[in-house]
Image (cartoon, helix red, strand yellow):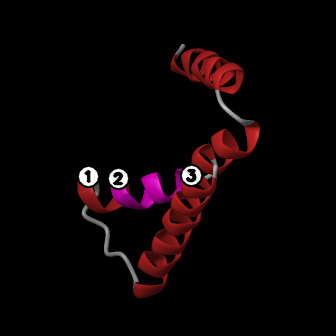
Amino acid sequence: MIDVAAWLFYAHVLAQKELSLTTAITESYPVIGIFFAFKFNKEKISGWQIFGAALALSGVLGIILIS
């Protein structure tokens, strides 16, 4: 049920915003996974994971600022 709601919200956003912007934001989901793993599972995050998350977020911010 949550999956269906997520797809409906995704379709709604695609109708409102540019595909390139929406895709860039939604494809940064590994960053959210890293955050939740750190916050809720108390997992240790390596330097490479932090670097990758920062790189992904800076890419999304770059696309947002260009658009």
Mark 3–mark 1 distance (CA, rounded to whole Å)? 29 Å
Viewer-side residue, 60 vs 66: 66
Residue range corresponding to the magenta coloring: 29-35
* Nearest to viewer (mark 3 / mark 1): 3
Q: Quadrant of residue 50?
A: bottom left
In the image, what residue occupies the spot 75% across and 37% down?
A: 19
Which kind of residue does numbered mark 2 sit on?
Answer: Phe
Count residues near mark 2 (Cα–Cα under 10 Å), then give few for <14, some for 14-19, many for 20+: few
**Residue 11: image location, x then y, percent:** 68, 20
C-beta proximity under 8 Å, tags 3 and 1: no
Which kind of residue does numbered mark 3 sit on?
Answer: Ile
- 42 vs 67, left or right, is left
Residue at the limit of the structure toward the bottom, as seen here: 47
Which kind of residue does numbered mark 1 sit on?
Answer: Phe
C-beta proximity under 8 Å, tags 2 and 1: yes
| In the image, residue 30 lies in the stretch drawn in magenta | yes
Q: Which tag, 2 or 3, sits closer to the chain's start?
A: 2
Q: Residue under label 1, please give it.
A: 40
**Residue 17: image location, x then y, percent:** 65, 30
Q: Residue under label 2, please give it.
A: 36
